[in-house]
Image (tube, coloured by chain):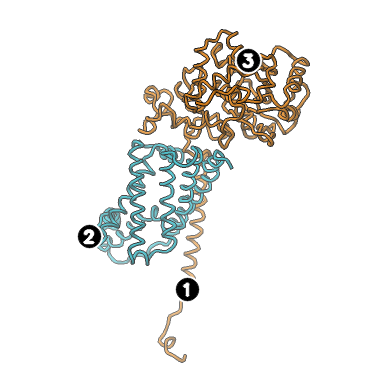
Amino acid sequence: MTATEWLLWARGPAFEIATVILVMGIIVRLIEILMLGRKENLAAPKGSATTGGLRTIVSRSVPDSGTFQRSTFTIVAGYIFHIGLFVVIFLLAPHILVFSKLTGLSWPALPTTIVDAFAVITILALIAVLINRLNNKVKRYLSGPMDYIVWALTTLPLITGYMAFHRIGFSGPMLIALHIMSVELLMIAIPFTKLSHAFTLFLARFYNGAVTGIKGVQS
Amino acid sequence: MEPVKSPMDLNPAVKSTGAQGETVGEALRRQGISRRGFLKFCATTASLMALPPTMIPRIAEALENARRPSVIWLSFQECTGCTESLTRSHAPTIEGLIFDAISLDYHHTLQAAAGDAAEAAREEAMKENYGNYVLVVDGSIPLGNPGYSTIAGVSNEDMLKEAAAGAAAIIAVGSCSAFGGLPNADPNPTGAVSVQEIITDKPVVNVPGCPPIPVVITGVLAHFLTFGGLPELDQLGRPVAFYGQSIHDRCYRRPFYDKGLFAETFDDEGARKGWCLYKLGCKGPTTYNACAVTKWNDGTSFPIEAGHPCLGCSEPKFWDAGGFYEALSTPTTDIARTAVYAVAAGAAAGVAAGALNKANKKRALSEHQTTTLDDLSPGT
């Protein structure tokens, strides 16, 4: 296959396949979780479940001082690469065009050079957390093959995207094809791995907060 | 510096060609081209081919003394746009006259002869210069049915094979002959193919573009006249000297891309300020050609300079590579519709899976048996 054919495949059939697997997979998972339901609580509520749930979504995103002191590196590096991923995925003009075609919505982009800087910082942060994972005995013990696969699937699109923007290593069509295909691998992996936390995280936090909120306990 | 070789040494093929025995230099002088204009062309050619300035006198010397080689130009499934491009090299500019300085023995559009006389000219040129003529092809070749395109009753495929057999060099001019082009676009009703899909035993120089830049066509011919061989080619058979860099990398609007300043429509502020045309579907990042360097219409401008995104016409399958006005980053299919179907299917599957989980849980509950102390005591 020529570079052009790879690019056409990546932008056409491969993107369709990846979208169907991602969307179907996430919807199935979310509905399964929601249909698990909750046991009826017969006790008189001492507080609001909704308020507790919403508060926890925010409060659990802010580390308390004790945790921060114990795991400074994990929290700082984790924040950096999550914010970096958000900026790179949602605030680069060519990416917004994809979301726009999918949803009809559009929003302003950041200047490309700023997104480029975020991409570099994100890649560095991801490399740092990998080194930390390998050097920290507890983290290494807790890590299975899937953790490393998930790391690679997250980092690969950043690296191919950086290469595509700076036009390193391959022809123009091949660079864009490689970048899109690496994103498609990530899309396919999300519903089947812990990467699905992107869609379940706030649901889980709300649930935790709601359980304590109805008991009148702050969490 | 090593002495300048004679064109005969540089290009043995030139020796026996030259239907009229006139050198290129003589032909140019006869047509009133100044030495200064000629050297300017040689300098441009040298810089386009990424050759050092020391090569300019060698090119001049070689071209000056080269016998005019016989060129046979075959036109198959094409629109004559490639010929139009070549003739619009602003005669009497040097590019046009270099073209006059070859012996163009057969060309549908440009030759005076017609019918049997034209075919006789082709056959005679092929016979006289067998093994030494340059074969230029524009247009694709239909393999679906030979009757789709014939010349004097001869199918394009047969004529190409016959002419290629005695050619010293084959140059596929235009995207149709290089890659199949428009006739090859989905659903390709004529079964159109490129020259190199038929001629596999000889190297083919692809000079794609819809149409190609005039100076690129003449530059490839000049290379053959000067050095006797074919230029360095890329993976798609294109001369690296002209197709080595992408439109994007040489685009004067590139700083706007880097800054994230884009025209959103053809008449907004960004368009008026000359910002990047990426969002309007520019294929510059995936297109390799010399437009941004040599420009068109005697160096006036090129499509992006005129405010229109690059269509990617010098790349294979450019008609099928998504919409001309769809940005390169976007999916080529109706992805929103696919996503809606996926949501519906996911919801149905999710509800079914959830119901199954519930049923399992219920059955487990109903089958649940209370453990008693007796169950736990040993020996029961």
Q: Amino acid at mark 2?
A: Gln
| Residue B366, numbered circle | 1
Q: Amino acid at mark 3?
A: Thr
Q: What subunit carries mark 3?
A: B
Q: Amino acid at mark 1?
A: Ser
Asked whether, in this view, residue B174 is left or right of residue B298, the answer is right
Question: SS of the residue at dot 3?
Answer: loop
**Colour orange maps to chain:** B
Above or below B121: residue B13: below
Q: Position of residue B163 (x, y in %)?
A: 72, 27
Q: Are marks 3 and 2 on the same chain?
A: no
| Residue A142, numbered circle | none
Question: SS of the residue at dot 1?
Answer: helix
| Residue A69, numbered circle | 2
* Discs 3/2, front: 3
Q: Quadrant of residue B369?
A: bottom left
Q: Which residue bears the numbered disc 3? A: B23
Q: Position of residue B234 (x, y in %)?
A: 55, 35
